[in-house]
Image (spheres, grey):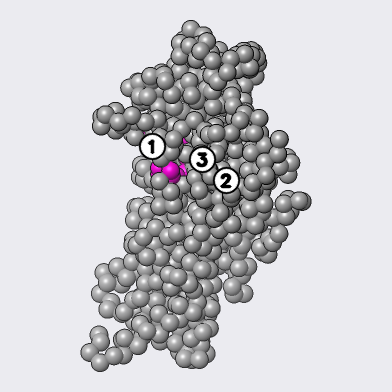
Amino acid sequence: MTIKKEITEYDFPEELKEMEQAELPLLAAQIRDFLISNVAMTGGHLSSNLGAVELTMALHRVFDLPHDKIIWDVGHQIYTHKILTGRAHAMGSLRQTDGLSGFPRPSESATDVIASGHSSTSISTAMGIAEARDINGDDYNVIAVIGDGAMTGGPAYEGLNNAGTKRTRIIVILNDNNMSIGRNVGSISQHLSHLRASKSYLDMKKLLKRGITQVPGIGESLFRGLEHVRDLARYALITESIFEDLGFSYYGPVDGHDTSELADILNAAKSIDGPILIHAVTRKGKGYKNAEDNPDHFHGIGSFDSETGVVVKSPSGLPWSDLAGRELLRLADTDERIIAITAAMTDGTGLKRFKEQYSKRFFDVGIAEGHAVSFAAGLAIAGLRPFVCIYSSFLQRAYDQIICDIALQKLPVVFLIDRAGNVGADGELHHGLFDLSYLGHIPNVRLFAPADDSEFISIMDFAQKYNDGPVFIRYPRGTTPGSLTDDMPVDPTKSRVLLSTDNEADTEIWAAGTMAAVAIEAAKILAPQGICDVVSAVSVRPLDSDALQEAAKTKKAIITLEDNILRGGFGEYVSSYLSGEGYSTPVLCIGWPDQFIEHGDISDLQERYGLSPNKIAERITDFLGSLQAPGSV
């Protein structure tokens, strides 16, 4: 039997529901080929999607969307879901400007229940929807799909505990591939490994296959067995399952790459009252050898050659993450107090070499950012110097711990905030556009935004020795600009002039972090008018008050530029400070507007929102022109 249609020609999900069992593996293979060819062009999350093909097919074969509700934890494994919900024709625009999002997006499809891009929250969301269903007297199924990596996050257990106690009728599917982005860590991963290896797994597979082959469809006897879960169909050693202890009926482990088997279990689960957890074992990167052999590399990848797996175009220069890892390793070589902590992002935060060289001083705590911060507090209290390496948007999840456990205690913990600013294709859920705002107002905090390598290195040296509170260092995705000037060393507590016009410019651009390079380009556009110098703020909190006051006294206007939302950001700090000191110098604040910014190419988004060099130059010209207009102040 051969499937002759192209993926874009199917009438999904109707045709999927009508397919014979023998056709399902062929469709799964076709979907995988389609995913590989498309992600090779657009980039994206490949390994996780290849591992979830059959599972997603089973869900769409059994449930009726959007009447039934599927909540995808993290959300980066939903490419097959997009294909099966009428978006196959648009997959070539995945993660591109104005194209399909790489995550669930309700504005794209009613089958996307909630935008999700972080971790461990799907069970709580599913429980809320299910309780609302029961309160309203509705009748539909609610399914949460959560990866085993997300089970290292505390919110998952808050949801499990509450749903198990309330006996809420939800179905939780644990997609167990023994990985998050990298290899999973912790006792939960060990528990799942034990369940996967149990003899009951092998016995269950034999029993289930025998039942399916003997009886058409589900089979009355098998159905009764599944319905009386406590008597016949607890597929693993229930006394060893934490999920049973939390009040869930546990099914598994089951083969997550057998669509027919999964569909039979899901059909049976629909009729059982109460919370159910189905443990599906899958392989990350399945069906594409390059991804199977190196699932970490293909978790999130740019455009690549589908035959060789080689990235088509790698950006030149040193990635900021690698610079951070290199400098942390340098400091650790001479300071045994230094500890590195990450939340399931060892490679992503540049800590691979640190882990290899100082394994006893390295901790991957899993997807548990709040725990990572409080854990660092304990280390600091005991006299060590922890460096916590977390992406900006993920650090938001630990806001309370930052305030109460770190800043309030004035503990010398250093935070390396990766992926700060606009991250491009990952979009709204991953842009690090809020950290200057959510950290800058916290007492006892020192907050730095390096513009180049020189500033970053100097800040790291400062942070190693600083004992009066936490230090936060933010830097973006992508590569560093090298050194923007020749002056070394840099005093990280002082601002730094990066570009000065030959004549005395009457305007200064104060840039926070990597927007300094953009500011230099904008100033060069304005160079014929000789109106702008460029200053790197370096320290956002506290500001370099002496230099800022001098600028307010001598300059006609001050322009602030930041890769952060304007509300509560660097520009507002500057404006508020000058106003509080009694200066009336006009300030133009340039940054991202007060809204969630969509995904797309960073340069496209900068142009769209007025943050490209040309747009910045235009805005400065207009602003200065307005100051000269009759009646202007």
Q: Distance between the residues labelled 3 and 2?
A: 8 Å
Q: Residue furthest top?
A: 231
Majority secondary structure in the magenta region: loop
Q: Which of 98 and 296 is in front in this view?
A: 98
- Could you say which disc has been placed on residue 67 in the image? 1
Classify mark 1: residues with Cα within 10 Å, few (<14), some (14-19) or many (20+).
few
Q: Which of 61 and 286 is in front in this view?
A: 61
Q: Which residue is drawn at 42% across and 20% down?
A: 271
Of marks 1 and 2, the one in the foreground: 2
Quadrant for residue 259, please give it: top right
**Helix, strand or loop at disc 2?**
loop
Magenta residues, start to end:
111-125
Q: Distance between the residues labelled 1 and 3?
A: 13 Å
- The percent position of residue 2, horizontal first and vertical second, equals 70, 39
- The percent position of residue 73, horizontal first and vertical second, equals 47, 38
Task: Name the residue tied to disc 3.
Answer: 13
- The percent position of residue 145, horizontal first and vertical second, equals 49, 34
